[in-house]
Amino acid sequence: MRERTAKLRAQWRKIWGQRRFRIAIVAALTLFAIVLPYFFQTGSTFTYDMVTALAYVVMALGLNIVVGFAGLLDLGYVAFFAIGAYTIGWLGSGFFAYINNQKGIHVGVTGLAATLPGIHLNFILVVIAAVGFTALAGIIIGLPTLRLRGDYIAIVTLAFGEIIHDVAVNGINIHLGANATLTAGRQGITPIDPISLPGGQPFDPLNLRPWYWVALGMVALVLFVNVRLRDSRLGRAWVALREDEVAAASMGVPLVKTKLMAYATGAAFGGMAGAFIGSFLNTVNADQFEFSFSIFVLAMVILGGLGSIWGVVLGAILLSFINTWLIPQVLNSVPSKIGLNFDLTQLSYGIFGFLLVVMMVLRPQGLLPERRHELEMVEHVGITGTDMFEETV
Amino acid sequence: MEAHTATIAPRRHSAAYRALKVWWQKYSLIIFLLILPVAFGLNDLFTTGSLSHIGENLKDGISNGAIWALVAIGYTLVYGIIELINFAHGDVFMIGSFVSTGLWATLGLTLVTGVFGLVGGLLASLVVAMVACGLLNTLIERVAYRPLRNAPKLAPLITAVGMSFILQNVALLWLGGSQQSVPDLLHAQQDLFNIGGIHVYRADLLSVAVTAPLVIALILFLNRSRVGKAMRATAQDPEAARLMGINVDTTISLTFLIGGALAGAAGLVFALYETTIWYFQGFTAGLIAFTAAVMGGIGNVQGAVLGGLIIGCIQQISDNRIGAQWTNVIVFGYLIAIMVLRPRGLLGEETREAG
């Protein structure tokens, strides 16, 4: 039996190793992903959930660069989501209604948004701004962690995430000039301009297909960047850093630059997804930026496999659907059936926590592991010392 | 780390610069810590001519900080021995509040219970909360950390976060998502006495009266007893300790037991002190206590107590003077400042993690 599976596996490796086969698979998947919304109605729940899932994929791939590639545990990733979302809140809504004598500033927008007060920039411009802001924020958050390692980094990033959350909540009391505040706190900035691509009409909130394709395009872009980065000089420097910081430094890897690049790149993806989600949900609300969201994204990365690009894509889609479909739609009736009276959706983060523990104990390498990480996690190859107690410096 | 940066980019500095740098490394954190109390103290002195307001804040800070000190000791002990930030520790503290307040109802403690019944009942609930939280913490170590002892360091930290979410959701099921008020058994805000215009309430006395003996007992236990010696030995070098015949696994379990028990005691005091509990209290408390542990120097029990008291004071000053909604920002700002300025904390030695 074992021989047979080994044989099958070897055959599979041979087929998978062929470039043509891999291109065919990727092409088929891409085509399937593009036509997928045609199987559902324009406003179907499935498409809605799928758009959300794709936005989460972008975020998880961003976090994967920081945690998976560079090995810097970031527990405050929600900060970049928040900054990206506020970028579209500020630059793509009527939030600053008094700017320019209530006439507003409009760049490249059509339809209703072009007539409203406030700042209204084209979605592409907003995304570029969001990427810039979040990359900068990533560097700022990265700077104090440069001298630190391991779990201290986790706590500093967590503290930053909480600070951003508190500023978002209390920003309603921070006045910018006479008629504007920094954020709208828990009330939320709403409505947000729907996406309008250059030269096109704004997207219809009821027709989810264009939203889906934009999200898919973002995923494709981020995937491309991820794959290219992984194999680049920078990507190899990240992995070297993760494996052994001292060895990497003595081989000439510039620590500061490499770490900051990881933070900035990871953050930029978070910002991009944040701007998209802000527009898609039509609100930017401080309650979206809780610590638990950071853990939600981290769980996607862990579930799929740290450092494994396709694993993270799978993990993000799976967890997103567990969150939007499995728990509220399928499992929610279970407690009442067995005579218990509670709302399972309240406990979704408990379920994710449980998932984290189970994954780490039973399958720490994730669903679709990256080879190097698998060796490390399962066979403990390449860890300095086989014991957590041993000196790592 | 310092050494590596130096080898990469060798630089020569004047003697004055180096002396200034040493001075800054030594005292910058202390200066940062003194900014808030000194600024508001001077402000009081000039506006009202007395220091009683800032004194009141500091007194509140010390009694509040005594609770954080108990929680911080748990972080520091565990970190000292297995170099893990026990992320679920704050939630163990929260469970301590839930267990003890739940027990009051079972024991029939109400506002009209007599003195003897009250003291007996509270002592009983203190013991139960300590035992329950100690066992819970040991269980967490057994289930979530021990299987990962040989894995990369990221792994147990992630399970710790997972355990924290599980405990929070258990509590959410237990009492629901809103803040629950619990009976103010001790009439916590009743004035006891008055020193120089500073009112000391029952709650203040309670938290100090519970914390001080526990801390003293713990320090004696660590320094004098055989088991305490084994714990210190394991913290210093687990491998060597094992070779000397110390059962490292038992010692680690014991560390978690003690840390959890102290968190349970803190949970009871917190419930009596604040008279409201909710499932999310452990998250903030955990971060505050962790900040305290780092501030004092992680791995150092006295440092954790000192850090707890200082953080308590910062928190109270911020609550009363700047606005409660900004307190977390200020505490986390301090956490980051400590990490940047002096990662080893006030009393700590150079650790490999933070050096």
Image (tube, coloured by chain):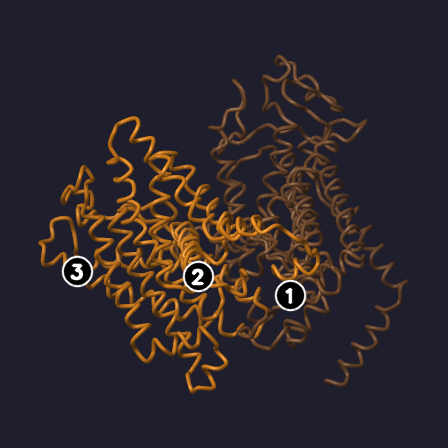
Chain colours: A brown, B orange
Image quadrant in which you'd find residue A69: bottom right
* Residue wearing tag 2: B348
Mark 2 in CB contact with mark 1 (< 8 angstroms): no
* Residue B129 pos. (x, y %): 28, 63
- Of all chains, the one bearing label 2 is B
Locate the C terminus of chain B by quadrant. bottom right
Q: Amino acid at mark 1?
A: Gly
* Residue wearing tag 1: A366
Q: Residue furthest front?
A: B15
A319 is higher (above) or lower (below) than A180: below
State which tag comes first along the sequence, 3 or 2.
Answer: 3
Disc 1 residue crowd, few under 14, some 14–19, many 20+, Cα 10 Å: many
Image quadrant in which you'd find residue A307: bottom right
Front position in the image: B274 or A42: B274
User: Do dots 3 and 2 share one subunit?
Assistant: yes
The residues bearing labels 2 and 1 have C-alpha atoms spaced at a distance of 37 Å
- Of all chains, the one bearing label 1 is A
Locate the N terminus of chain B by quadrant. bottom right
Q: Residue furthest right?
A: A20
- Under circle 1, the secondary element is loop
* Residue wearing tag 3: B121
The residues bearing labels 3 and 1 have C-alpha atoms spaced at a distance of 49 Å
In the image: residue A109, left or right of residue A384: right
B318 is higher (above) or lower (below) than A14: above
